[in-house]
Image (cartoon, coloured by chain):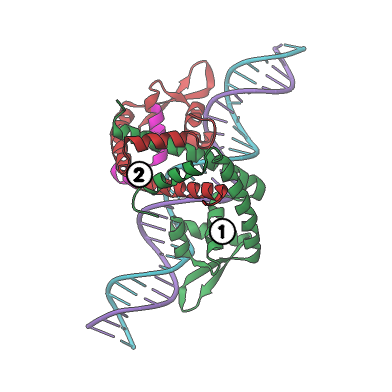
Chain colours: A red, B green, C cyan, D purple
Amino acid sequence: MSRPLPKQRLRVWLRMLAAQREIETGLREALRLKFDSTLPRFDVLSALDRYRDGLRMSELSAKLKVSNGNVTGIVERLAGEGLVERVAVDGDRRAMQVRLTPTGAERFAEMATAHEGWIDEQLSAFDSDELEQLIRLLERMGGENA
Amino acid sequence: MSRPLPKQRLRVWLRMLAAQREIETGLREALRLKFDSTLPRFDVLSALDRYRDGLRMSELSAKLKVSNGNVTGIVERLAGEGLVERVAVDGDRRAMQVRLTPTGAERFAEMATAHEGWIDEQLSAFDSDELEQLIRLLERMGGENA
DNA sequence: TGCAGATATTTTATACTTGAAATATATTCT
DNA sequence: AGAATATATTTCAAGTATAAAATATCTGCA
């Protein structure tokens, strides 16, 4: 005799929000204290680290699933810090290619190491099997995505 | 021969972020289109709906786990829409009690019904057993919380 | 009583986020 | 070529979010 499905689903959703918020709060603070940075900036650096040739603004916002205007601001700040650079795309004067500077790459490497450690702590309660279970379940959440 | 634990944990985290973002994007848009409202506002109304006598600003921000200043702004807008009201707490002139207006209660009831339906859709892939599994796993995520 | 410290809330500065409008450049079609 | 349309990006307005400073009030204690 379990509760009705819709309520159960709602409960899962609320629990997920809570877990996420808690972990994110920790990450945000750690990033601020250790690197004087933020999660959105980390996300941008992370995407650019994976694509060393750089990405266009629109590719960047597509990868991160945030709006174009949003990326404009974050990249602007990262450029101000000397961590990324914007170069003209030849053949299309509308477009901008963004990529890590050497400093940015170095910086990101440090941040990524720390980041992985923090997540490892936050999810330390789970063993390999449980993590696999989680992945499988989470992959089916929302819709038809990777 | 599975991948190292820290990487696996990172993968779970990233997958969780993705799922959450996707669902939230849908919710946000639905709330905007159907109710000309937002998720943060919904969250505040939801908390006040559970505590019909009202909550103080600080109780509200504690429940929602957002900063005090943040709640100030959201409540201000909700008050402007006539959905909540702020009343002085007698015995403590520093404090403010916030509660739903009748209009706010009505409005929230509609929103809550729709909200539950949206979540039900987003998590429609899961049956009762899987939802229980998810709850149990998510409850262990982060730290020592409910 | 009166003041030192604690508490409740708002204000401020800064950043992030979106959706929509604006700008600039490309492309397509006749 | 020139106009209409499409694409890439930025700008804008509004809202959300935090941390820290400022206000206002309360409490406990000398």
Q: Is residue A40 above or below residue A29?
A: above
How many angstroms separate mark 1 from mark 2 (CA)? 28 Å
Q: How crowded is mark 1: few (under 14 residues within 10 Å), some or many (20 or more)?
A: many
The magenta span reads A28-48
**Residue A74 makes an appearance in the image:** no
Task: Decide if residue B3 is on the left or right side of residue B60.
Answer: left
Q: Which mark is residue B45?
A: 1
Residue drawn at x 35%, y 32% as measured from the top left = A83
Q: In this view, does B58 lie above or below A130?
A: below
- How many numbered badges does the structure rendering display? 2
Snapshot quadrant of residue C25: top right
Look at the image and say whether residue A40 sits in the magenta stretch: yes
Q: Residue A82 carries which label?
A: none
Determine which residue is flagged by label 2.
A27
Q: Where is residue B87 in the image (x, y as percent from the top left)?
A: 55, 71
Residue drawn at x 64%, y 66% as measured from the top left = B102
Q: Position of residue A3 (x, y in %)?
A: 53, 52
Snapshot quadrant of residue D3: top right
Snapshot quadrant of residue B16: top left
- Looking at the image, is mark 1 or mark 2 nearer the viewer? 1
The residue most toward the front is A1
Three-letter amino acid code at the position of disc 1: Leu
